[in-house]
Image (cartoon, rainbow, N blue to C red):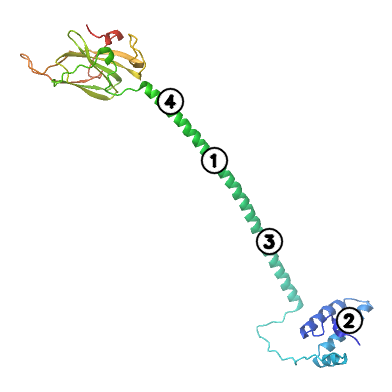
Amino acid sequence: MKDHYRTLGVPDNASELEIKLAYRRLAKRYHPDVNAGAKGAEERFKEITEAYSILSDFSLRHAYDTRRMRPAIYYPEPKEEKKDPRRKDYSEEELEWARARHKKKVQAHMTRRKKILTGMIVMFIVFMTASGIFDRWIEQKREDESKEFAARLDSMMKIKQEYAKTHIETMDSPFDSLFGSGVHDSESKNKLYIFMPFSDAVICAMQTEPPYRTIRNEFIRAQMGFVMNEVPDGKYIVKLYTGKMWDVNKKTPDGRKLGGFTKDELFLKVDANPIRLQNFKIKNMPANVEDTITLSPAHLKFDTITREEFFYQGE
């Protein structure tokens, strides 16, 4: 007895749909039109058709199973299914087209995912490379800043050393050890206002009468002024030592290291009547306790004197 289940390649309890699909697949493969002149294919096609005609019919299948002396398999009467008007039966060609389209979409999706993954890998590599470059740039910048800071610090130290070498404050009396300490009269109200507009200078007030002493010497920066207070009564001339770049280690003519200008030094004397300062009235002459001098070529005339004349200490 022929085993129609084996002919179609389905199990004994195969459903109606499984039997139908198996038949379609085999019929398409062994159809005489496809296998022209092949006797074996024709016989095989007849067996397949016979098996399907029996197993696709509920009554014939039941009788066939009984003849095979197998336990009766209960096949419920197929219920007539209500066809969904929205459901469409697709042909094999339409299904193949749908499968091909789905495969194409899956391939396109996988291609996109591959591109995205490749892009992420490239971005990661770029990020890591950029991070390394950035870290090296930061390290180089810090190293450059450290070198720059060290250079600035070294420059500041040099400036500080140079400043210490040449520093002198306004109102310092650099030549007290040469001329003697400044002469003051605590009871005197005499004041001499001096303004120096054009150069750093040492300003000296020198007596015009014996013993011709230099009673005051003060250092002043250009564009600054100062006041000589408590000046004793008397007549005075003003002499100047001007120049640039004061060096505290420069020596005076007698060999003492009292300081002096190292550039453009010049020794001058104001060519004007002596300054008279007095607290009391003289016959036919009022008291004069204050005077102001602006040491500018626009206001006064200067005579050039020698270094020895400037450093003259009196009788």
Q: In the image, is residue 276 above or below residue 1?
A: above
Residue 180 left/right relative to 133: left
- Residue at figure coordinates x 26%, y 25% from the top left: 224
Q: Nearer the viewer, mark 4 or mark 2?
A: 4
Which of the two discs, 4 and 2, labels the residue nearer the N terminus?
2
Residue 209 left/right relative to 221: left
Q: Nearer the viewer, mark 1 or mark 2?
A: 1
Give the residue pinned by disc 1.
Answer: 139
Three-letter code, disc 4: Lys
Q: Position of residue 175 (x, y in %)?
A: 28, 15
Q: Secondary structure at mark 2?
A: helix
Give the residue pinned by disc 2.
Answer: 45
Give the residue pinned by disc 3.
Answer: 111
Camera-nearest residue between 17 and 215:
215
Which of the two discs, 1 and 4, labels the residue nearer the N terminus?
1
Q: Nearer the viewer, mark 3 or mark 4?
A: 4
Question: Alpha-carbon distance for marks 1 and 3?
Answer: 41 Å
Counting the numbered discs, the total is: 4
Which of the two discs, 3 and 2, labels the residue nearer the N terminus?
2
Three-letter code, disc 2: Phe
Camera-nearest residue between 91 and 216:
216
